[in-house]
């Protein structure tokens, strides 16, 4: 975790201190024991179907995926024995209990620490606290970290449910089973990890470079055209689950549609002094900007719902900027050295990172500033926008760019 925090400024130091304090063992054990009954460890969750569900009132499943029947279709059975189990429930404690569960899953002498606690092993219990009374109390709580919070099968009025016919007569009301689909969070996370590796890992980048140079490479190049992103949890993905938070709410959807012929090729940004002069003409950017402008022109109430809706549209604009950037980076490296390229050095390095332009200090901060200036300019007529809005757009852009950098996308 600490290795992902870059920089030497006060903000980076503060984040390191925060993470170091969070992972103090004794504090982690004691705080986790206090809130463990508010969290469900699961492979299949309901909050991703509807966020208002509560783990104590609705079923979430923690399935042994390796024990599931083999099927000819993709499902949780393909995960085998290595499964990233999720933590769902009270969003304030999801991360805490998730990290604690990972710690308790470490094998010691042939079985996990959690298994030893469930058996009441004296050595395992004694390791939890300096006092015997405290250790017993913590062990009792932690031993139940993976038990179901809802004692009986239950769904929620706002969750998806469907009647599945099991008889021959559709008029017979007893000839149906009521199914309540759950979100396969562990499978979704594995898909996300696989696609991120295929798209952004150093090995994948090397394979694409070898393909361009018509050289052999041991790794195949995998492409996922028309990939869509479903956002869960809005600006607070941790309210759904911990794995959803690690993905920043991104859930990748593979295209299931026939191919569409596209004659327009990706063209380099030439003859303009800013990438945003091209970016602003993208259909999705025009649509999102118009929605945001009309929303703010309506003078919405100053409350959490308004801020959430505003930030979701701005985040969608940033996602579109990342897509635009990815398209430009599929071009032959060095296109920005063309005499017709009038972009500043910041934009050249951003769109053509292997083009030979000297590195730009604080590239992410510079692009976040440019994005904030552009968005303020787009909305300023007729809205009275100024420094407060600029600072908010800049912070939102910087946060997303930094997250992308930590994942190795930038």
Image (spheres, rainbow, N blue to C red):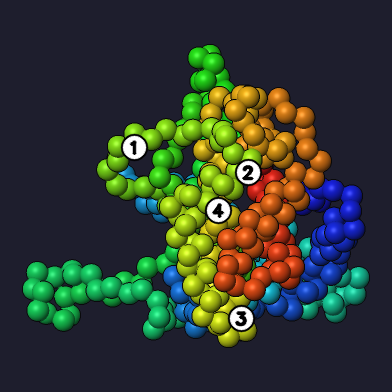
- Which mark lies nearer to you, 3 or 2? 2
- Which mark lies nearer to you, 1 or 4? 1
Above or below residue 327? Residue 256 is below
At 80% from the left and 50% from the top, the residue drawn is: 5
Disc on res. 304: 3
In the picture, measured across the screen, residue 327 lies left or right of residue 396, that is left
User: Can see residue 81?
Assistant: no
Above or below residue 121? Residue 134 is below
Disc on res. 333: none
Residue bearing the label numbered 2: 274
At 49% from the left and 72% from the top, the residue drawn is: 294
Single out the residue that lies furthest toward the top: 215
At 48% from the left and 50% from the top, the residue drawn is: 281
In the picture, measured across the screen, residue 122 lies left or right of residue 130, that is left
Residue bearing the label numbered 4: 319
Separation of marks 1 and 4 at Cα, in angstroms: 22 Å
Whole-percent x, y for residue 377 in the image: 62, 60
Label 3, residues with CA under 10 Å away: few <14, some 14-19, many ≥20: few
Residue bearing the label numbered 1: 262
């Amino acid at each position: 975790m600490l290795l992902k925090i870059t920089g030497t400024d006060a903000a980076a130091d503060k984040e390191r201190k925060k993470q170091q304090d969070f992972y103090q063992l004794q504090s982690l054990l004691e705080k986790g024991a206090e809130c463990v009954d508010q969290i469900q460890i699961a492979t299949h969750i309901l909050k991703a179907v509807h966020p208002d569900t509560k783990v104590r009132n609705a079923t979430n499943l923690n399935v042994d995926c390796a024990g599931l029947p083999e099927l000819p279709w993709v499902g949780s059975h393909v995960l085998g024995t290595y499964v990233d189990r999720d933590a769902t429930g009270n969003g304030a404690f999801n991360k805490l209990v998730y990290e604690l569960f990972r710690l308790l899953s470490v094998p010691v002498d042939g079985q996990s620490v959690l298994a030893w606690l469930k058996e009441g092993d004296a050595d395992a219990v004694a390791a939890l606290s300096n006092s015997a009374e405290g250790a017993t109390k913590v062990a009792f709580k932690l031993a139940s970290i993976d038990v179901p919070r809802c004692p009986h099968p239950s769904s929620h009025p706002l969750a998806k449910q469907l009647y599945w016919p099991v008889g021959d007569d559709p008029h017979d009301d007893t000839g149906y089973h009521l199914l309540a689909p759950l979100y396969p969070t562990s499978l979704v996370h594995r898909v996300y990890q696989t696609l991120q590796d295929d798209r952004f890992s150093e090995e994948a980048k090397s394979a694409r470079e070898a393909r361009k140079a018509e050289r052999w490479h041991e790794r195949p190049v995998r492409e996922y055209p028309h990939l869509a992103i479903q956002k869960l949890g809005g600006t607070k993905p941790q309210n759904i689950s911990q794995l959803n938070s690690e993905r920043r709410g991104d859930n990748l959807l593979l295209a299931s549609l026939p191919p569409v012929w596209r004659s327009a090729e990706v063209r380099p940004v030439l003859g303009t002094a800013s990438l945003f002069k091209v970016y602003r003409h993208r259909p999705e950017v025009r649509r999102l900007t118009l929605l945001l402008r009309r929303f703010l022109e309506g003078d919405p109430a100053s409350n959490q719902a308004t801020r959430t809706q505003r930030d979701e549209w701005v985040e969608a604009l940033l996602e579109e900027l990342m897509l635009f950037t990815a398209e430009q980076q599929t071009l032959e490296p060095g296109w920005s050295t063309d005499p017709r390229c009038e972009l500043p050095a910041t934009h050249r390095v951003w769109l053509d990172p292997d083009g030979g332009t000297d590195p730009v200090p604080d590239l992410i901060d510079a692009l976040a500033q440019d994005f904030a200036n552009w968005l303020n300019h787009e909305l300023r007529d007729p809205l009275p926008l100024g420094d407060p809005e600029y600072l908010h757009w800049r912070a939102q852009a910087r946060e997303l760019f930094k997250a992308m950098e930590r994942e190795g996308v930038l």
